[in-house]
Image: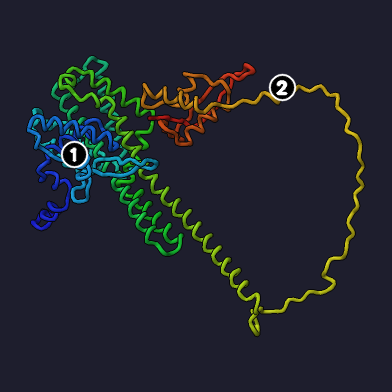
Amino acid sequence: MSFDIDTLEALRRQHPAWRLLLADSAALVASFLHRVFVLPNRRVIHQAELATALDDTLYAVREQRGPGSYPKSALEYLNDWAANDKAWLRKFYPPGSDEPHFDLTPATERALAWLGSLSERGFVGTESRLLTLIELLRQMSEGSETDPEVRVQELQRRRDAIDAEIDRVRAGDLPLLGDTALKERFAQFATLARELLADFREVEHNFRGLDRRVRERIALWDGSKGALLQEILGERDLIDESDQGRSFRAFWDFLMSRDRQDELSALLDRVLQLEPVADMAPDPRLRRVHYDWLEAGEQTQRTVALLSQQLRRFLDDQAFLENRRIMDILRGIESGALAVRAQQPAGDFTSIDETAPSIGLPMERPLHAPPLKLAITSSRIAAGDEDLDAAALYSQFIVDKAALAQHVRQSLQQRKQVTLAELVASRPLQQGLAELVAYLSLAAEPRVGVNAMIDDSVEEQVDWVARSGRRKSARLPRVIFSR
């Protein structure tokens, strides 16, 4: 970015973050949005809940500063903050909802992060950041080395260093981090964890911009479907293959691993119990920050899914318009035929040009074949004397999918996520394979309060006992239900 006067003046007029910092109500806007969105990591809040929270805030401010402070209503302030001239909030209607919802814009989150950096820090660590910079340089150097011998030498050097450290530990020499080093590294971890949550809004904003451009092209497109799809899918592939797209996909694959989630949970529990870290009074939400990352990533994935839905709707609309045009042509032909039925035009009514005459020879016609007369004999139907078990006609059963969905929601009341194997372990299958298929059906269709994701990279085994008493099992990809 160029820091010349013209560029900065244009940025001051146009950028929402700069407009927020210059606003007379910047203190109210920043404090309120930070409290309701950033601190609890709320991605989307519906209008009624957000207006109620702002009403409470305005009431408290007016009690302290007089009734003339901030005279507008809460809903007027929310609509004002979401207007195009400010763009501090994003107001939208989610699919299937007729109530407006609000979310922070990436520019607002940048302004809030900058305001948070203005306060004087009681502890400024430099060692951990220097070590991080050196480690990044080492990874870039080693990752770009094409000489196998050089890489082998580096790996051997690291192996020798690890062996030497193992020998020192076995001999009783345990190098431990001091209190200052622990505090420094934890402060850096907390900062990076919060910045990562802020990055998700910018990634989601970029995908939302692509969806907006797709809608604009569809609304103004007058060419063929193939050309539009080629252009849109090419831009989608360009984003997926960009540095940002590849980085997000690698992060998502890493975070979706259950082993990685368990490892992060164990590390956070152990680190937060350390006495130097506990003395810093860390934010309790850091204990589940990786689940906040997962929730923010799911929101970004849902934004990407909107693009596919828009393309499918475009194809359905085009097929409807083409069928309608065909029917209009047929009705025009019928109307023209009825118009000339009473008085046919003189001369040739129509003509067909052919390159050669069509010749039908007599011997090419099939010979007459008399139909076969079938002889039908009628006889009385004799009653059978077979002794069959009719219980099979009444042994049908129906799987109650509503009860299964209720079981999933009850399990998610205490946990953020639960797998299909854990659901079956807590309540064994009563109707065997049919009930297992019903669970998979719940995972494949959207239901209120139940979200599901299928991880094809991990397999799980589900066991149950059939009515005959035999124990059966099935191996299937891991199914994760979440709130």
Q: Residue furthest bottom?
A: 347
Q: Residue tagged by mark 2?
A: 391
Q: How many marks?
A: 2
Q: Position of residue 356 (x, y in %)?
A: 69, 79
Which callout, 2 or 1, points to the residue nearer the camera? 1
Q: Is residue 51 visible?
A: yes
Q: Closest to the observer: 61 or 343? A: 343
Q: Position of residue 78 (x, y in %)?
A: 21, 41
Tell me what residue is drawn at x 37 percent, y 52 percent. 236
State the CA–CA distance, disc 2 to disc 1: 69 Å
**204, above or below 294, in the image:** below
Q: Quadrant of the C terminus?
A: top left
Sort mark 1 into few (<14), some (14-19) or many (20+) by Cα contacts within 10 Å: few
Instruction: Tell me the number on the disc at residue 255.
Output: none
Q: Which of the 4 quarters of the picture holds residue 48?
A: top left
Sort mark 2 into few (<14), some (14-19) or many (20+) by Cα contacts within 10 Å: few
Whichever of callouts 2 and 1 sits on the residue coming sooner in the sequence is: 1
Q: Which amino acid lies under the numbered mark 2 shown in the image of this protein? A: Ala
Q: How is the image coloured?
A: rainbow
Q: Which amino acid lies under the numbered mark 1 shown in the image of this protein? A: Ser
Q: Residue tagged by mark 1?
A: 73
Q: What SS does tag 1 mark?
A: loop
Q: Closest to the observer: 220 or 302? A: 220
Q: Which of the 4 quarters of the picture holds residue 263?
A: top left
Q: Is residue 372 left or right of residue 258?
A: right
Q: Which of the 4 quarters of the picture holds residue 337?
A: bottom right
Q: Residue furthest top?
A: 172
Q: What SS does tag 2 mark?
A: helix
Q: Is residue 150 visible?
A: no
Q: Closest to the observer: 470 or 459? A: 470
Q: Position of residue 278 (x, y in %)?
A: 18, 19
Q: Is residue 392 left or right of residue 103?
A: right
